[in-house]
Amino acid sequence: MSPRSLLGTDQGSGGAALDLSVRIAGLTLANPVLTASGTFASGREYAGLVDLDRVGAIVTKGVSLEPWAGNPSPRIAETASGMLNSIGLQNPGVEAFIAKDLTWLAAHHPDVPVIVNVSGHTCAEYARVIERLEETEGVAGYEVNISCPNVEHGGMAFGTDRYAAAEVTSACRAATGRPLVVKLSPNVTDVAEIARAVEDAGADCVSLINTLLGMAVDTETFRPMLARVVGGLSGPAIKPVALRMVWQVAGAVDVPVIGMGGIRDARDAAEFMLAGATAVAVGTANFVDPATVTHIVDGLAEFCRTRGIVRVADLTGALVTD
Amino acid sequence: MRMPMCEACGDSGNRDMAVEHVVVRSNDRVCEGVGLMVLEAPATASKVRPGQFVHLRIASDREFMLRRPFSVHRAHGGTLEILYQVLGRGTRAMSLTQREDRMDLIGPLGHGWDIPDGLTHALLVAGGLGAAPLGMLAEELARRGVAATVVMGAPTGERLVARDLFERVARRVEACTDDGSAGEKGFVTVATHRLLDEGGFDMVYACGPEVMAKAVAGQAFEAGVACQVSLERLMACGIGVCLSCVVATVNGQKRACVDGPVFDAREVSWDVSEIPPRH
């Protein structure tokens, strides 16, 4: 279907059932709205506030081989239309994750796909987390975090160099046959180059963007607002940058793209899909309104219905540029 | 018998939380830089326990969007009282809020004050706006027939917030001010030291600047009296997800939003170098 016909007025849905499902990396998701890693834990804390069964997929908080303590406080600062964070991937390690989070999800929400975000200091550590999770049920796929700006070793160090990005992707690819998503950093000159490198190394999908490096200063105390001085900027402030990068990457790789960065309503989500994303993720907005994901699912359905679009997947890449 | 663990929230105390759309009943200046907001919030008001907080979405403009956590000062007749200090952008927006304005909150949240059975005489220590989470506690102690002595501290007599409430329900209220304009001149820790020396207390409840809370916790420990402290941290989610509000404890890092804000003082690994939140 061409973009023009998608917007045609003469081909209304005629009452046909709306199809919200999308396919990424061999997975069929009931809808294209995911949770962004680190903003939703594993969903358990949100269970009283959100219908978790309506989330397209839960992308978990980053999981490492051993427990990580994270960074000193203050760890967050609010900025115009966004927030800075410097959490530092604090997490209890893969064993605790399996015992607490995966077990709980399997017992209470067995039908929600769970994509486990994986972190490490070295390629081997990333692979070992995946190897351990390969022994468990209830994992739909992995998202490899090569883009966290808040850790000294690993994280963004892998995501800002195409050789390192390819190396960690290869190590993870060798560890699993499950769908493998690689999460990209926006803190690079040419994001498409990194995307192509991880695609060549075996990634089934790329997700972007992680946070943009940023900083804020308290003019009363002359101190940085974050203990670690710099941190990752998220929220609506970064949406135009994210959208641009999703558009660039979607044009550069053949694998599907999960778009994120400042999404808080269905129109934002539609922008990312039109720019080339197959699915989207909601991050910071979860902190403000815990029901954002389900509101966007409903809003996307409405968005499609009012435009006579019968498959939400048809939005992907339907940007009209001529 | 142990309470069964909440399926939804795991080990957190947030089993009653919900989003509630609330209406501002009143929003008045209490003293320099301090306001008292009364919210019509029947669902939360019926569930909240002393020391818990609500996560309030204040801003009507969308440029600054994070919620702000506030201890509940009092809850009665379907309303919540929020005592707040204007410190940053969020609380400045809050001070401009008017009667009939609408907002929403997530609450009630967090682990509040523990009131053990058989408590006879509690010492409540309020440094400045630390009075906020102690108001509801003082009322609950009175309801249960537990005697309370309150020590309050502020820069000036005018800024001894919630003094009337404490004088109504507590057995004794002692004030300390930096300028001596009311009560004793000096820090609350002078009064608390004297009172703990005199003895007769079986619990200390403290909230205020972290240096004060740490000092009071030390005095309580010396006196052999159990002590709980309510700690303040910057928060994004308020429900245990984002890990912004971590508190270092002897049992590892805990989250002020679900494991606290009230902690057993012996559990806290005090680090008062932390910059006070300007939110």
Image (cartoon, coloured by chain):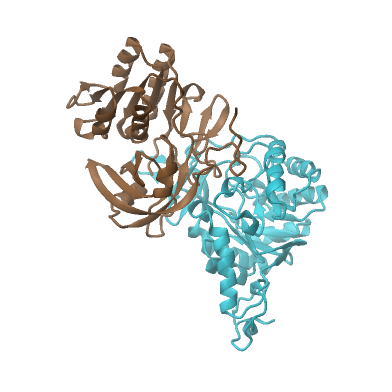
Chain colours: A cyan, B brown
The image shows residue B206 at horizontal and vertical percentages of 38, 26
| Residue A113, above or below A122 | below
Residue in front for this viewpoint, B2 or B85: B2
Answer left or right for B185 relative to B140. left
Instruction: Name the residue rendered at 41%, 23% in the picture.
Output: B214
Residue in front for this viewpoint, B168 or B126: B168
| Residue A168, above or below A306 | above
Instruction: Name the residue rendered at 41%, 17% in the picture.
Output: B202
Instruction: Name the residue rendered at 51%, 56% in the picture.
Output: A285
What is the quadrant of the C terminus of chain B in the image? top left
Answer left or right for B35 relative to B236. left
As drawn, which residue projects farthest toward the left? B181
The image shows residue B164 at horizontal and vertical percentages of 23, 33
As drawn, which residue projects farthest toward the bottom? A10
| Residue A120, above or below A203 | above
Q: In which quarter of the view is residue A111 placed?
A: bottom right
Residue in front for this viewpoint, A277 or A26: A26
The image shows residue A308 at horizontal and vertical percentages of 61, 81
The image shows residue A156 at horizontal and vertical percentages of 63, 48
Can you see residue B154? no
